Amino acid sequence: MNFFFLISWQNERHKLRFAIPTTINKYLDWKETHVDEFRKQWRSRKIHHIIRTEILQLNGKIAKGVNDFKRYFPQLIDLKPHQEIELVKGSGHLSLGGTFYLSQSEEVYQIKIILLPGRKIMFKMGLQTALCEEIIKVEEFILYTLAFLFGTQ
């Protein structure tokens, strides 16, 4: 977010730009979702254009594990809560999911965050609304932003 100021100094006007950091989670309005409802929608034809990142190494400076994601995005639900112990042991994976829309928008998105052994991660997203090129670009932007923030190559 940028703020612009006009100041006068020595009888001259100057325009200054001041950047205020914002985080992506400030723009995501989460919808309460239950595990069974999420799974049903994800597997049905109601979800369109599912895209995913490659498997990334988790950026330990931003998130060390599942609890950090739950802190950043408290509305995420455990899709397989019994597998958290297996992930800690180094086998299996843990999936978090959620449904959100963007502030002042009607497009509904679903996201899966898949935590894998060895501090690896993958993001998947899909749309519940009708497809158009602009909405798909927004979906891709959100996905790649999450990959940039939480993953390392």
Image (tube, helix red, strand yellow):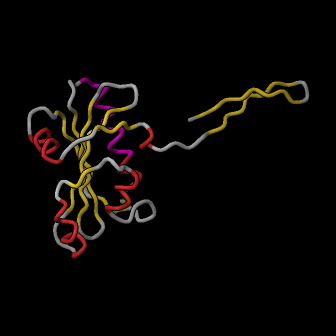
Magenta range: 132-145
Q: Quadrant of residue 71?
A: bottom left
Q: Quadrant of residue 152?
A: bottom left
Along the viewing direction, whichever of 136 and 31 lies nearer the viewer: 31
- Tell how many labels: 0
Magenta portion: prevailing SS class: helix
Residue 115 in magenta?
A: no
Residue furthest out toward the right: 10
Q: Residue at x 27, y 40 (%)?
A: 32
Q: Residue at x 29, y 49 (%)?
A: 76
Q: Residue at x 21, y 71 (%)?
A: 85
Along the viewing direction, whichever of 93 and 58 lies nearer the viewer: 93
Task: Give coordinates of residue 17: x percent, y percent.
Answer: 67, 34
Q: Is residue 8 visible?
A: yes
Q: Quadrant of residue 116?
A: bottom left
Task: Give coordinates of residue 104: x percent, y percent.
Answer: 39, 25
Q: Image height check: is 14 above or below 150?
A: above
Task: Give coordinates of residue 67: x percent, y percent.
Answer: 35, 62
Q: Image height check: is 130 above or below 118?
A: above
Task: Give coordinates of residue 37: x percent, y percent.
Answer: 14, 41
Q: Is residue 57 visible?
A: no
Q: Quadrant of the N terminus?
A: top right
Q: Image height check: is 145 above or below 94?
A: above
Residue 137 in magenta?
A: yes
Q: Residue at x 16, y 64 (%)?
A: 82
Q: Quadrant of the C terminus?
A: bottom left
Q: Residue 33 vs residue 61: left or right?
A: left
